């Protein structure tokens, strides 16, 4: 994992092909720790997309939420 920063916002970049052992475990722990906050941000974004012109963007955010739920183990 490597810490990145774009426009003053920090994030961690996880390279699944490179990371092993403890880095893989740490990535899993980060998904669990920050998954709920990420889900809340996604839900908030979806609520903001109300116009018919934003239907495609809204669908993208639903797909992102589904993928996140799969990764953190809270998906149905």
Image (cartoon, rainbow, N blue to C red):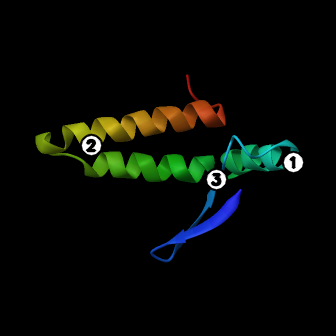
Residue 10 position in % (x across, y down): 57, 69
Q: Report the number of numbered marks.
A: 3
* Residue labelled with disc 3: 34
Q: Which residue reaches farthest top?
A: 76
The quarter of the picture where the N terminus appears is: bottom right
* Residue labelled with disc 1: 22
Of the two numbered discs 2 and 3 on the same chain, state the one appearing first in sequence.
3
Circle 3 packing at 10 Å, graded few (<14), some (14-19), many (20+), is: few
As helix, strand or loop, the secondary structure at mark 3 comes to helix
| Residue shown at the point (53%, 51%) measured from the top left | 38
Vertical comparison of 47 with 63: above or below: below
* Residue labelled with disc 2: 57
As helix, strand or loop, the secondary structure at mark 2 comes to helix
| Residue shown at the point (81%, 50%) measured from the top left | 23
Q: Nearer the viewer, residue 4 or 74?
A: 4
Residue 6 position in % (x across, y down): 49, 71
């Amino acid at each position: 994992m490597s810490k990145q920063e774009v426009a003053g916002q920090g994030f961690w970049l996880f390279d699944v092909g490179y990371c092993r052992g403890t880095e893989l475990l740490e990535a899993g722990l980060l998904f669990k720790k920050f998954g709920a906050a990420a889900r809340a941000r996604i839900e908030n974004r979806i609520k903001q997309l109300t116009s018919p012109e934003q239907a495609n963007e809204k669908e993208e955010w639903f797909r992102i939420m589904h993928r996140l739920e799969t990764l953190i183990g809270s998906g149905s």
